Amino acid sequence: MKPLGPGRVEQIALLAAHCDDIAIGAGGTLLTLARANPGLTVHALVLTGSGSEREVEEKAALAAFLPGADVHLTVTDIPDGRSPGYWAEAKDTLAAFRRTCEPDIVFAPQRHDAHQDHRQLASLAPSEFRDHSILGYEILKWESDLPTPTFYHPLSATVAQEKVDLLHASYPSQVDKDWFDADAFLGLSRVRGVQCKSRYAEAFVVEKTVIDFVGV
């Protein structure tokens, strides 16, 4: 399997329904991106958790997962678990966020996530980022909704372990959850690694991709 590289990445957008979604779904990839692209600009939007300890955690987490990057984080106060009932607010928030950035890559939830908040944001993302590559990340949780990925990012063993360590250090409010542990995170990363002939990996769903062989 021959990898295709995007070249230098200067700006990315991160979309999440909840604080910790981004780090769980793409933390290893973010560590790699930030280190490979010094001066990376990051625009992040989280729809729930404004004013809570979760927002404090998310700010510290993104700083840790994106070393050296210029991170701009927006956290709003849409009620957790109720996002579909606030469709207009979510749509307007995403539209306003879109006007603040022109990313090379967008990270968002994947469309078939069983959590209603994740699923709604996944459906809204392409309506605002219409000309962008959107990588739909997967979030390990109680529901049996892991996707069939179409895009893989290999991780070294060092980065995979660093992701786990940072998740535990960054989100103390979540460490008592029965699914929030090293075995779960490393286990999924190992499975995704097997699927792309790597030790570890993170996997994404990409619904539409354009490839240009001649540069026109």
Image: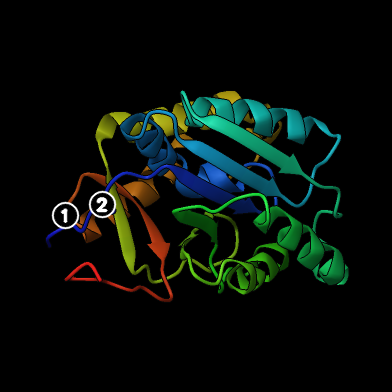
Query: What kind of residue is marked 1?
Result: Lys
Quadrant location of the C terminus in the rendered image: bottom left
Q: How many marks?
A: 2
The structure residue drawn at horizontal position 86% and vertical position 48%, both measured from the top left corner, is 77
Please tell me whether residue 87 is drawn above or below residue 105 in the rendered image: below
Give neighbour class at mark 1: few <14, some 14-19, many 20+ (Cα, 10 Å).
Answer: few
The structure residue drawn at horizontal position 82% and vertical position 70%, both measured from the top left corner, is 87
- Disc 1 to disc 2: CB gap under 8 Å: yes
Residue that numbered label 2 is attached to: 193
Query: What kind of residue is marked 2?
Result: Gly
Q: Is residue 197 visible?
A: yes
Please tell me whether residue 7 is drawn above or below residue 71 in the rendered image: below
Could you say whether the residue bearing mark 2 is in a helix, strand or loop?
helix
- Observer-nearest residue: 185 or 49? 49
* Residue 197, numbered circle: 1
The structure residue drawn at horizontal position 12% and vertical position 62%, both measured from the top left corner, is 1
Where residue 212 sits: x, y (%)?
Answer: 24, 71
Please tell me whether residue 118 is drawn above or below residue 66 in the rendered image: below
* Residue 73, numbered circle: none
Q: Is residue 30 left or right of residue 45?
A: left
Q: Is residue 180 visible?
A: no
Where residue 132 sits: x, y (%)?
Answer: 48, 65
